[in-house]
Image (cartoon, rainbow, N blue to C red):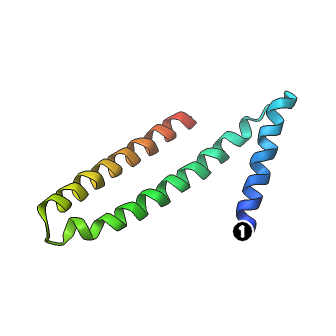
Amino acid sequence: MHSSTSVQHLKKLHGILNYSHSGVDFSFGVPYLYQITLGLVLITSCTTLAGLLPLMLLEGDGFWQTLAIVVGWGLGASTLFLILLMGIWER
């Protein structure tokens, strides 16, 4: 059901969260969590933009083309903003 990589990620995340209850400094795990989150956000954004691309480029009903362009630009801008914000937050 789950790939071995996702199971390993879950075990590592579980270990990080357990350290927080024992009083041990777990700041080493924060960049790891950002890396996983950023990867998931980028995959989701890219697949959504790829799905909207035919609606943006092909001539058709003006409503759907305009809607796809607005949603695509909004998704792209918010993804860029999130990447920049996560990069600043890590420092």
On screen, residue 34 versus residue 69, left or right, reads right
Q: Quadrant location of the N terminus? A: bottom right
Left or right: residue 71 versus residue 83 is left
The image shows residue 72 at horizontal and vertical percentages of 29, 55
In the image, what residue occupies the spot 24% across and 67% down?
55
Residue 38: x and y, percent?
53, 50
The residue closer to the viewer here, 87 or 3, is: 3
Compared with 87, 68 (above or below) is below
Q: Secondary structure at mark 1?
A: loop
State the residue at coordinates (39%, 42%): 81
Number of numbered discs visible in the structure rendering: 1
Residue placed furthest toward the top: 23
The structure residue drawn at horizontal position 31% and vertical position 64%, both measured from the top left corner, is 52
Which residue shows up at 13% across the image and 66% down it?
Answer: 61
Return the residue nearer the eye: 24 or 2.
Answer: 2
Residue 24 in sight in this render: no
- Residue pointed to by mark 1: 3
Residue 22 position, x and y percent, is: 87, 30
Among the 4 quarters of the image, the one containing residue 50: bottom left
Report the amino acid beneath label 1.
Ser
Residue 91 rendering spot, x and y as whole percentages: 56, 34
Could you say which quadrant of the image residue 21 lies in? top right
Q: Is residue 58 left or right of residue 77?
A: left
Q: Residue furthest right?
A: 22
Q: Residues within 10 Å of mark 1 (few under 14, many from 20)?
A: few
Is residue 61 found left or right of 38 in the rendered image? left
Residue 16 visible in this rendered orientation of the protein: yes
